[in-house]
Amino acid sequence: MARLLRINTRNKKAAFEDLSGDYAGLGGRGLTSRIVRREVPPTCHPLSSANKLVVAAGLLTGTTAANTGRLSVGGKSPLTNTIKESNAGGTFSQKLAKLDIMGLILEDKPEPGSKPIAIFINKDGVQFFETPELEGLGTYEASSRLFERFGSKAGVMVIGPAGENNRLASAIMFTDPKGNPSRAAGRGGLGALMGSKRVKAIVVDSQGAKGQEVADKEAFKSAAKRWAEILVNHPVTGQGLPGYGTSILINIINEAGTLPTQNFRSGRFDKAQQISGEKMVELINSRGGVAKEGCHAGCVIQCSQKYCDAKGEYLTSGFEYETVWAFGSNLLIADMDDIARLDRLCDDLGLDTIETGTTLAMAMEAGIIPWGEGQAAIDLLKRVYAPKDYLGAIIGNGTAFTAEALGVDRVPVVKRQSIPAYDPRAAKGIGVTYATSSMGADHTAGYAICQNILKVGGDIDPLGKAGNVEISKNLQIATAAVDSTGFCLFVAFAVLDTEDALDVIARLISARLGISFTADDIGKTGIEVLKDEYSFNRDAGFSPVHDQLPDFFINEELSPHNVKWDLSTDELQMAKVEI
């Protein structure tokens, strides 16, 4: 039976228990949200001892099924005060699953002034180490030292200075197959929650472990073969994403007129070509980088990369569309190397790139640094390293906090989480998701860009209301289910276009667990996840009034389509499941 590992961060004790009762048969987001709903008081302060940080492998993680190496991290968000699940790649999840640990919970909180610790988990159990030598280090140096101590085959989950100092935009970083801490559980400030527990890192080594058990090996093998075929043969997961990474979207979204530019003032950026996926791959190939690699073992999509500077030295990886937008058109920066340096800084500091990009836009709105100046943005972001730098502290606390501190009134947030890389006025399906997601503005919660722009899985007018509430609701349900499996969310492109895809997923889960699990059960799983999340938020004090976009989207037309946001709060409630 799969296990749950509870770690008390005050007394440094660990205990295993069977995954049973309300937690039986759950994984990923399904497990993190259920534990948070059952065990965390909704009205608690996110950095108090009452909050818990929950890490969960997906139901299929640790198996041979393609693209199942994702990880869910949950808790009450320090940034939004809502429930939160943040999803990440890297090697950590598969190693955790191979130790037969489905979930890991950090509980309680040490006394003030306690030294930071690292937690080491292997087949022999759990060990605690004080690590004052890692305090204040960026994630790259910290990871390097942890590999020296625990071996290069370990998986590392680590926070940077932002998380240590409880900054609200802080992320938790995970090492990729090359050992770089480039994969982020980025959104919601969960790095601050980990930092409040005084845990600098968790290191997992699955060597010698028996691995994940599969109830029906032959049935699983057959389903896994068909699953890989589905992904490899789809034009998005088999060609587009492997060829250019997620930044292939820059030119597509720009052409559609929904690429947010200069803090959502326009839907097009006249220098989009200079920061496009095509330009990125050109630079990677000319500098000896790698244009196509996976963020975890078993990934057949391989949309990650190794991006080098002009000298051919490694600079960053996991260089995603959202990051390129956040530091690119959003800030009017058109130098790919400057954008890559900002990405590297965020990974090292342990900051969410989306939140940080919109935060830097607040600094530009306030005149702290000029629009379009990449080096000025880099210099400002470096100030987050210093724990007592007041401006660095402001920037590290995210968009809404920075806007309040600097007196900015054009603030693109929902529930205090920044709006990502699609302007909701010209892609209204994703706007519905931003407004109604249980976790604040979040494109991954229900990626209606598929139907609004890419025309995958349907064709819904992005500029009108018709169909956009319904598609967002359906996608939010489906996404909650996908996040529970350990699948990379990008598999959704192939699932939406392939008739037998849901049945194949159901076959994988049935064979893995030895149960009868159908395609209908996938939707039911998503609904149960959302019920846990929405009911937590209700009890935390959130109501329909919080499910709406900022006024400037309602009042200002977006060029080139000259459209406004026009869905009422009442209309938006139709996108939420009943609790």
Image (cartoon, grey):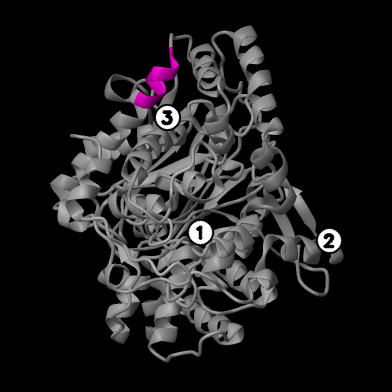
* Nearest-to-viewer mark from 2 and 1: 2
Vertical placement of 47 versus 503: above or below? below
- Residue topped by disc 1: 131
The quadrant in which residue 375 appears is bottom right
Vertical placement of 13 versus 323: above or below? above
Q: Nearer the viewer, residue 303 or 159?
A: 303
Q: Earlier in the sequence, mark 2 or mark 1?
A: 1
The segment highlighted magenta reads: 517-523
Residue located 74% across and 49% down the image: 243
Say what secondary structure mark 1 lies in: loop
Q: Is residue 542 visible?
A: no
Q: Nearer the viewer, residue 259 or 344?
A: 259
Amino acid on which disc 2 is placed: Asn
Q: Is residue 202 visible?
A: yes
Q: CA distance from mark 2 to mark 3?
A: 38 Å
Say what secondary structure mark 3 lies in: loop
Residue located 59% across and 73% down the image: 342
Amino acid on which disc 1 is placed: Thr
Dominant secondary structure of the residues highlighted in magenta in the image: helix
Amino acid on which disc 3 is placed: Gly
Q: Which percent across, then down, holds residue 362?
A: 39, 80
Residue located 34% across and 78% down the image: 402
Q: Along the horizontal axis of the image, is 300 left or right of 331? A: right
Say what secondary structure mark 2 lies in: helix
Q: CA distance from mark 2 to mark 1?
A: 39 Å
Vertical placement of 147 versus 275: above or below? above
The disc placed on residue 285 is: 2
- Residue topped by disc 3: 27
Q: Earlier in the sequence, mark 1 or mark 3?
A: 3
Residue located 67% across and 26% down the image: 228
Q: Which percent across, then down, holds residue 269?
A: 57, 74
* Whether label 1 touches label 3, CB < 8 Å: no
